[in-house]
Each structure stands twice: as C-alpha cells, then as structure tokens.
Image: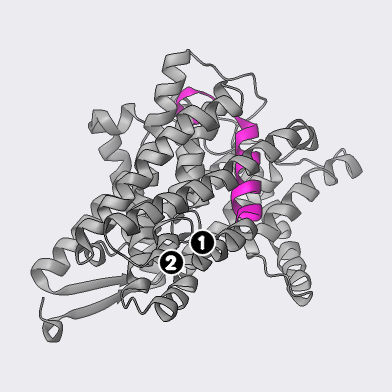
Amino acid sequence: MDETALKTFEVPDFVSVTLGLIVFFLGAFLTRHVAFLRNYNIPEPVSGGLAVALLTWALFAWAGLELTFNLETRDELLVIFFTTIGLNARMADLIAGGRAILVLLALTIGFMLLQNTTGLVGTVLFDLPKPVSVLLGSASLIGGHGTAIAWGPTIRTETGFAAAEEIGIASATLGLVFAALIGGPIAKYLIDRGKLEPTESDGPVVGLPYDEKEKSDDGIDHINLMRAFLAVNVAIIIGYFANEAISATGLKLPLFVSCLLVGIIMSNTVPALFPRLPWPARSRSLALISDYTLSVFLAMSLMSMQLWTLAGLGGPLLGVLLLQVLATVVFILFVVFPAMGRDYTAAVLSAGFAGFSLGATPTAIANMSSVTKRYGPAPLAFILLPLVSAFFVDLANAFIIRFFVAL
C-alpha cells in the first residue's frame, strides 16, 4: 500500500452509534441464517462486527481508504452497562458467591501466570526478546488494548524491539476476536455434555431469552423503562462523584467500576429503606437496557477493529495467539469448570472466562448473555465475573507483568 495514496476518513460519533445498531441487526440476520453462529452461541454484535471489520479491511486493501470511528458514545455505553449489572446485584447473591469470588480470582491469577509463560515460550520459538512475552500474554490479552498501549513503550525502551507497541495492540485485537468466538462453543459443549440446566430465577439479568422476544405482551411499558433509566442515571451520577473522590486519594479506578459498586450499594439499600418504591432490579426493562448498551458497545468495538494492522506481523503473532487459545481452552475445561462446581453456572462462567481472558470484560458478558438467552438464566455468573475481571484483575496483572518483564 502506497502511504502517499492512503486516504483516511473518521466516521462521526452519532453515525458510529447508528452504524453500531445496523451492525447488530446484521449480526442478528447472520445468526438466523448461519447454523454455526446460531448453534454455538456467537453473539449477534460479534458476527456483525467482524463482518464489517472485514469490509473495512477490503476498503483499505483495494481502495486505499482507512476508516476510523469516533467512539466517544461507545465508552459511555460501557458505563451504563456496568451500572445495570450493579443494580441487579443482591447481597444474598454476593454472600453466596463470596467463596466463588475468591476461587475465580485465584484461578485468574494462576491463568495470568500461565498466559505469560505461554507468551514466553512463544518468544523463544520465534526468537523475540523475552520481555515481549507480556505483550503476547496478560498485558494485551487479559489487560486489553489499554494495558498493551501502556506497556508497549516500556518494552520497546528496555529491549530495543521497535515493533513492541504494534505487537501489543495487534495481540489485543486478535485476542478479542478469538475471545468472542470460543466462549459460546465451550459453554455449549459443557452444557450439552453434562445435560446441565439453570436453577429457577425471578428475572433476567442481561437480555431476554430468545423465545420471549416475539411476545407482544412482555410486561414492559414506557413507565417501567423510564424508571429503570432513572435508577441507572442516578447511580452513574453518584458513581462519577465517588470516582472523583477515589481518584483524589491516588487510587485510579475506571469510571465503570465505581458505577458498578454504586449500583450494588443502591440495590441493597434503597429497596430496604423505601419498600414501597418500585425498584427495577431483575426487571425486563433493566435487562433490555443492559442488552442494548452491551450490544451496541460490542458492535462498535468490533466493527472499528483495523484488521490490516495484524497482517504485517504475520506468523509469529498468529502462532503465539493460537498457543494462547489452546492454553485457554484446556485451562477452562480442566480447571475453571471443575473448580467452579461443574454446574450450569460454572458452564456460563466458562464462556465468560474465555471472553475476558483473551479479550475484555464486555466480551465475557456478551458470551455469557448469548448462552443464557438460549439455555436459561445464571444471575450469579453476571455478578461474579465483573467483580473479578473489572476490579481485582488489573491490580494483580500489574505485579505479574513487572515480574515477567524483570525476567
């Protein structure tokens, strides 16, 4: 590609959101008509987003046009989504999941060590500097694009490896693709093999089951939907000020984590203090808000991937990432699923673990949502995984990355 002939165009924010909606419906169309996507629980925004990412790659290769997307609203949707997760949390679930949170956290820390060890093996196989292992491991996969971007310059300075930043971003991008594709098949295999079924639940957490979507009388009206939006907005406002106060102490937390925690506190205090006040937790209205924000966020994330940036890194990157996928699948099947109880919730968590261990927490939630909309609810999974993946993991990952870089 002649760089001088390259044309760039940034899609405005509002248009990007609109395209995110179109991408979702494209994914829904593909899921209805492609048996593999339907049978293996590939989320609609994933199939649609990847299709558009391939289209933008074709435009880049054949027309010299580089499309970028303004994603400001996408990041706001992430905050809304995690706030709805917090509002659905109940203290009884959190108490019941206390031990499970510790187990899942221990498994995640152990897996980060395995992930970086796998990256280290990859650097030996492809003759790369050993500190690059973290950019092929937990810095870019569990850590995501943000952590990869943060550590790339450090690795480049310490090793003199000029492509460190590029390989970190590319690894995070390719990991996100694999994360979105393997979670559903893993859960399907575990559920079908063990004939697992969900326990009874009093309401949805994220999205409505597929067999409910065609019902005309679903109990949702504009009052319930506006009530749910009001609770979400209040939680976000409080979460914003809480995040500012936390930042003033020197502790940096993503805004969505603060809003998640505020949502949990509100749902476990407001109904008790004001028992006559209608509260939207576990309601269909809140489930729809969760589904909408997550679906558009993920569709925008995947459609905006610049897949052509992966091509120049070629065999070494793909080789190491395939090793990481193999390690992830084996770890989930033989460690995560048994340790989390071998039940239906463990199978749903397995899909989520695949999502965030190779991609990001929203990918994990999308994987779990796709599974539960087909097989049935697993409320505890939607509480446990975000608390571990969005809160504790970043702290542990920083220490683990430093350890492997020191090697």
Count of number-bearing discs? 2
The one of 334 and 83 positioned closer to us in this rendering: 334
The one of 405 and 312 positioned closer to us in this rendering: 405
- The reply to whether callout 2 and callout 1 are in contact (CB within 8 Å) is yes
In percent of width and height, residue 201 lies at: 65, 24
In the displayed structure, 46 sits above or below 139; it is above
Numbered label attached to residue 94: none
Pick out the residue farthest to the bottom. 4
In percent of width and height, residue 6 lies at: 16, 80
Separation (CA) of disc 2 from disc 1: 7 Å
Q: Residue 163's quadrant in the figure?
A: bottom left
Question: Which residue sits at x=36%, y=72%?
Answer: 164
Q: Earlier in the sequence, mark 2 or mark 1?
A: 2
Question: Which residue sits at x=60%, y=59%?
Answer: 394
The magenta-colored residue range is: 372-393
In the displayed structure, 348 sits above or below 386; it is above
Is residue 367 at least partly visible in the picture?
Answer: yes
Residue 70 within the segment the image draws in magenta: no
Q: Secondary structure at mark 1?
A: helix
For residue 98, side relative to residue 321 (left or right): right
Location of mark 2 (residue): 131
* Circle 1: residue type: Phe
Numbered label attached to residue 404: 1
